[in-house]
């Protein structure tokens, strides 16, 4: 058990939390993003003030490691690294899709159901994975183009709860009878403690100097078209 600061910036939502022994003691979020570069430093300051007033010194910083927004992930990871250097704290990397699945667990209505978290990518592409109710991996992380046959092999056997900000655009395409959609599940720092505590107990610490987010796909820059 530990005091852990949690940072989540993989999507438009910016959130932070502080937990002790797996229980959230403080949290902040801004759903109106992306505004991570502005909001996160303020959230960190508020969290540190709370920690200081309550005698809580973080032993680790857990950060959402991707996949997700290239810019958002870099802001979150760089902030987490700075805090780890300053405190001599451990760095924990939390899989973003698994974090979304963690948030969906309480809404499962079938013990044998599967969870498919989705992060919105371009057009009809999502970053996705499939987990069982114990968060064991059933289908590995991938960038997937969604069509009417997506996940058909699994849907023929089990109910799948689709969630995350990529699920909404798939609702009219994945129409299998075993498909369920949870529209209010997002990756949030307040849902990180269970995963972070497990990683801390297993000493799954990252190299603060060399850790990089998991982007899944390389960032592609484009040259703006000339206005003349």
Image: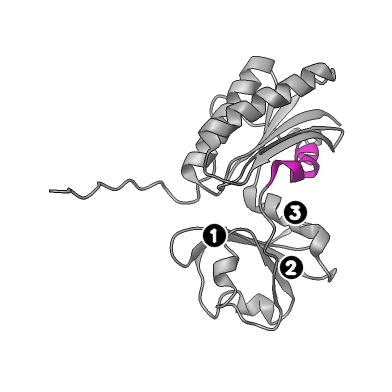
Q: Are marks 3 and 1 in contact (CB under 8 Å)?
A: no
Around disc 3, counting alpha carbons within 10 Å, would you say few (fewer than 14), some (14 to 19), or many (20 or more)?
many
First-in-chain label (2 vs 3): 3
Q: Is residue 26 visible from the viewing direction of this image?
A: yes
Q: Quadrant of residue 76?
A: top right
Q: Which is nearer the eye, 119 or 216?
A: 119
Question: Which secondary structure, mark 2?
Answer: strand
Q: Quadrant of residue 54?
A: top right
Disc 2: which residue: 114
Q: Which residues are magenta?
A: 188-199
Mark number displayed over residue 103: 3
| Residue farthest along the left direction in this orientation | 228
Q: CA distance from mark 1 to mark 2?
A: 16 Å
Q: Are marks 2 and 3 in contact (CB under 8 Å)?
A: no
Q: Is 212 placed left or right of 175 in the picture?
A: left
Count of marks overlaid on the render:
3
Q: Is residue 194 magenta?
A: yes
Q: Residue at x 78, y 17 (%)?
A: 52
Q: Is residue 209 above or below residue 171?
A: above
Q: Residue at x 63, y 79 (%)?
A: 153
Q: Is residue 101 magenta?
A: no
Disc 1: which residue: 142
Q: Quarter of the image containing the N terminus?
A: top right
Around disc 2, counting alpha carbons within 10 Å, would you say few (fewer than 14), some (14 to 19), or many (20 or more)?
many
């Amino acid at each position: 058990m530990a005091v852990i600061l949690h940072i989540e910036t993989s999507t438009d939502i910016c959130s932070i939390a502080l937990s002790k022994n797996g229980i959230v003691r403080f949290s902040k979020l801004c759903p109106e993003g992306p505004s991570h570069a502005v909001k996160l430093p303020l959230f960190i300051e508020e969290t540190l003030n709370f920690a200081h007033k309550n005698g809580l010194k973080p032993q680790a910083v857990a950060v959402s490691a991707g996949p997700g927004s290239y810019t958002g992930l870099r802001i979150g990871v760089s902030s987490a690294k700075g805090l780890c250097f300053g405190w001599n704290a451990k760095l924990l990397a939390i899989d973003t899709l698994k974090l979304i699945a963690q948030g969906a667990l309480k809404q499962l209505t079938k013990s044998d159901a599967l969870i498919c978290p989705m992060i919105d990518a371009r057009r009809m592409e999502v970053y996705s994975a499939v987990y069982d109710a114990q968060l064991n991996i059933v289908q590995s992380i991938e960038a997937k183009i969604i069509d009417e046959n997506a996940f058909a092999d699994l849907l023929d056997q089990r109910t799948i709860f689709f969630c995350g900000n990529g699920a909404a655009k798939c609702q009219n395409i994945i129409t299998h009878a075993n498909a369920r959609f949870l529209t209010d599940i997002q990756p949030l720092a307040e849902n990180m403690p269970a995963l972070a505590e497990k990683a801390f107990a297993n000493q799954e610490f990252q190299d603060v100097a060399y850790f990089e987010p998991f982007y899944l796909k390389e960032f592609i820059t484009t040259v703006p078209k000339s206005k003349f």
